[in-house]
Image (cartoon, grey):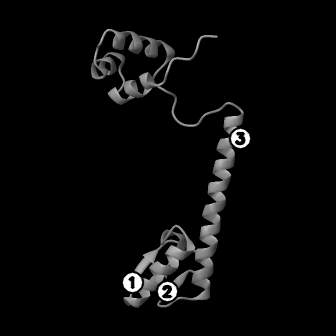
């Protein structure tokens, strides 16, 4: 027997969930859903189980859409998600000057207290054109 909290823990979408359940049932594995509309033990496919999978896929799609809408709205207001960059304008200028002196990315990162990849990414962005 396979036990899951909710049916949406079995898969990301309806088709994948149906295929997974079908394979489990063919192998003689029962599925126990602990919570939700499909709660209970299942040894074969049922309408309740199929409906729970369809609703889970719809809920996941809705969450994704709302998240993307929120990120787009924040971007329109000039907000960007994620952690603030460790590369401040002062650090970036220092890194550019050090690189002009042929100092390695690793040594620049050590000197500025950031990783080598952070330095590489920051220096890969071209300087803004003078206005």
- In x, y percent, where is residue 11? 49, 70
Residue positioned 68% across, 30% down in the render = 78
Residue positioned 38% across, 26% down in the render = 120
Looking at the image, is mark 2 or mark 1 earlier in the sequence? 1
102 with respect to 123 (left or right): left
Structural distance between the alpha carbons of marks 3 and 1: 45 Å
55 with respect to 25 (left or right): right
Structural distance between the alpha carbons of marks 3 and 2: 43 Å
Q: Look at the numbered disc 1 and give the secondary structure of its residue.
A: loop
* Residue 68 vertical placement versus 11 (above, below): above
Q: Which residue is mark 3?
A: 73
Looking at the image, is mark 3 or mark 1 earlier in the sequence? 1
* Residue 123 vertical placement versus 18 (above, below): above
Q: Look at the numbered disc 2 and give the secondary structure of its residue.
A: strand
**Residue 41's mark?**
2
Residue 34 seen in the figure = no
Q: Name the foreground residue: 37 vs 62.
A: 62
């Amino acid at each position: 027997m396979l036990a899951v909290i909710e049916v949406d823990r079995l898969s990301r979408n309806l088709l994948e969930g149906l295929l997974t359940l079908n394979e489990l049932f063919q192998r003689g594995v029962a599925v126990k859903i602990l919570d939700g509309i499909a709660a209970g033990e299942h040894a074969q496919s049922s309408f309740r189980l199929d409906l729970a999978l369809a609703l889970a896929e719809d809920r996941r799609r809705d969450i994704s859409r709302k998240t993307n809408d929120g990120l787009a709205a924040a971007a329109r207001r000039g907000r960007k998600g994620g952690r603030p960059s460790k590369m401040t304008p002062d650090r970036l200028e220092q890194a550019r000057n050090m690189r002009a002196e042929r100092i390695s990315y690793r040594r620049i990162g050590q000197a500025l207290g950031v990783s080598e990849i952070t330095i590489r990414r920051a220096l890969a962005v071209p300087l803004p054109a003078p206005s």
